[in-house]
Amino acid sequence: AQSVAQPEDQVNVAEGNPLTVKCTYSVSGNPYLFWYVQYPNRGLQFLLKYITGDNLVKGSYGFEAEFNKSQTSFHLKKPSALVSDSALYFCAVRPVELNNAGNMLTFGGGTRLMVKP
Amino acid sequence: DSGVTQTPKHLITATGQRVTLRCSPRSGDLSVYWYQQSLDQGLQFLIQYYNGEERAKGNILERFSAQQFPDLHSELNLSSLELGDSALYFCASSATQGETQYFGPGTRLLVL
């Protein structure tokens, strides 16, 4: 079975400072990894994904994520946080090889990012 | 805007009732997924359809069912509703089974 852990319920950072939102995963075989963001009263917006290749993935709104196979991690990062980045962030995983679970995504519990002016 | 539409946005109903949630995928997407987001369970996968056929089932209750129609829109039917069914229900779609899933704005269900 696959699983995702986001160890921090909330991350606080000052505007202009770098931010990191942590994610570790467990999956059989190779993973596809995703980050989504949820703003209040909105659906989940796709930020970025890792499929294969370069371990550093760049996504929307200046976010990037680093895949580390040995540590089974996929941390989300941004060099300079904006107040408008404040939202709920979800990490998700699915195995590369489709199985009886189809293409289902397994999500972490979410991390609330608070960026203060 | 992801291109995935869901109706209604909000739904308030009573215990024991039945409701239907509707989802229209992005143009050209063949795969539709349903997820439930609740405070205690987080985001959980319910069911997936691909080109009209059920492809995978997750933690979906027997009181819940879904289908995908020939025009590729999907409906999630929730029956014998209980207080604990109150949640945000998301639909997502992808071009094929392996592609990125794009989420709709969700339907917020409140069971009183």
Image: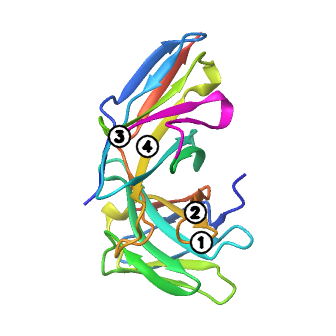
Question: In terms of image quadrants, where is residue B18?
Answer: bottom left
Q: Are marks 2 and 1 on the same chain?
A: yes
For the residues bearing labels 3 and 1, Cβ distance under 8 angstroms: no
Circle 2 chain: B
Disc 3 residue crowd, few under 14, some 14–19, many 20+, Cα 10 Å: few
Give the distance between the C-alpha atoms of the residues marked 1 and 4, in whole angstroms: 21 Å
Give the distance between the C-alpha atoms of the residues marked 4 and 3, in whole angstroms: 15 Å
Describe the element under mark 4 as helix, strand or loop.
strand
* Residue linked to disc 2: B99
Residue at image point 45% right, 63% down: B35
Q: What residue type is labelled 2?
A: Glu
Q: Which residue lies furthest to the front in this view?
A: A53
Give the distance between the C-alpha atoms of the residues marked 3 and 2, in whole angstroms: 21 Å
Q: What stretch is highlighted in magenta?
A: A53-68
Describe the element under mark 3 as helix, strand or loop.
loop
Give the distance between the C-alpha atoms of the residues marked 2 and 4, in whole angstroms: 16 Å
Disc 4 residue crowd, few under 14, some 14–19, many 20+, Cα 10 Å: many
For the residues bearing labels 2 and 1, Cβ distance under 8 angstroms: yes
Residue at image point 36% right, 73% down: A99
Q: Which amino acid does label 4 sit on?
A: Cys
Question: In terms of image quadrants, where is residue A94?
Answer: bottom left
* Residue linked to disc 1: B96
User: Can residue B112 be seen?
Assistant: no
Residue at image point 42% right, 49% down: A92
Tell which of A31 and B23 is nearer to you. Answer: A31
Q: In this view, does B46 lie to the left or right of A87?
A: left
Disc nearest the viewer among 3 and 1? 3
* Residue linked to disc 4: A91
Q: Is residue A85 left or right of residue A105?
A: right
Q: Look at the picture and state if B33 lies above or below B50.
A: above
Circle 3 chain: A
